[in-house]
Image (tube, rainbow, N blue to C red):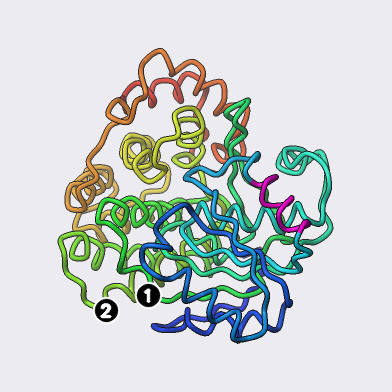
Amino acid sequence: MDFQYHLPVNLIFGRGKADKVGEISSAYGKKALVVTGTGSTKKSGLLDRTLNSLKNAGIDCTVFDKVTQNPLTTTVYEGVALAKENDCDMVIGVGGGSIMDAAKAVAFCCVNDGDVSDYIFGLKQGVKSLPIVLIPTTCGTGSEGNQIAVLTNPETKDKKAIYTINIMPSASIVDPDVMTTMPKHVLSSVGFDAFTHALEAYTSKKASPLTDIQSLLAMELIAENLPGLVAGNNDPQAWEAVSLAATLGGMVIGAAGVSAAHGMEHPASGLKNIVHGRGLAALTPCIVERLASALPQKFAKVSQLLGGKDETDCADSIRRFLKAIDLDVRLGELGITPDDVEWMTENCMKISIGNLKNAPVTFSRDEVAQIYREAI
């Protein structure tokens, strides 16, 4: 065995904990840029609750509410300008994965000047960021538990992550109660994203005994609880289970990384701004069919968690699970056409080669193109 697992984030988990954001954040600063999306946290009342809690703790707040799905590098720059204009000394992200990733990137770029793409591609190394506090509202990306922030460059369509310990959150408040306002189509998408995080980390070349244990628990919790929640069961314990699974999924990809499915999905959503979890749903079964024989014991375990037999039916077990959560989709339904395959393949080999190499089998350019065609 040879591995390292470094996770310097204060994880605060429990129902009702979101209302303690002011008390928790007061340890990190006095002027907060509150990063959120365009609607859901306002409709649910969470944004107002957050602002009230912060103000009661003596923290001045400036709201930045322009983040959309698949956050853009240009949006990050807008957030940085607003934070600097208001002398913010910390960033608080309230929302789903896109909001949390954008909040991390804003906090980073407030301290590290220049083009964020230079840091994404490793041309520059950052030194630190403003303190970051996160409140996830979707049980999906697990961004609250890692040092990753995925951004899309609107000019090049490149979708790739800042990956640096400098953007590890100072504190993340995981409150299952705030997840319950998600529409069911959002829940199924983010829940499958969390599942693939655990699946890819579990079968990663960088997997370790610690990430294996966490990945298996995350997949088990999602398999047992997500279908019922999508069907309308609002059992509080089920919400706790999927919320914990999402955080675990974020933690394990921070240590073991993602692999082929994420590597191939990013060009698709970078090109067509599709929902990330839906893109993963279209691609993952096709990919698992090609990987399962290379790591039979692990893929057999995944299949069994989903009610299957062994590695030979793992892809079909995933397909059945996707039907159970109303996420049986193809890339063609998401706007991807055969004409897009060449661009996505080239972009994947440029942007995601590290992800491809982290899988049990490294796909060639031709294999990547063939998987895209099959998934359409």
Residue 208, image quadrant? bottom right
User: Which residue is at a point 71% across and 68% down the rendered structure image?
Assistant: 90
Q: CA distance from mark 1 to mark 2?
A: 8 Å
Which residue matches tag 1? 176
User: Which residue is at a point 54% across and 66% down the rendered structure image?
Assistant: 144
Q: Does 309 sit above or below residue 375?
A: below
Residue 42 in the image, given as x and y percentages of width and height = 42, 63
Q: Does 163 sit above or below residue 24?
A: above
- Segment colored magenta: 76-85
Which residue matches tag 2? 236
Mark 1 element type? helix
Q: What kind of residue is marked 1? A: Pro
Count of residue discs: 2
> Chief secondary structure of the magenta span?
helix
Marks 1/2 in contact by CB < 8 Å: the verdict is yes
Residue 110, image quadrant? bottom right
Q: What kind of residue is marked 2? A: Pro
Residue 239 in the image, given as x and y percentages of width and height = 30, 73
| Label located before the other in sequence (1 or 2) | 1
286 on left or right of 95? left
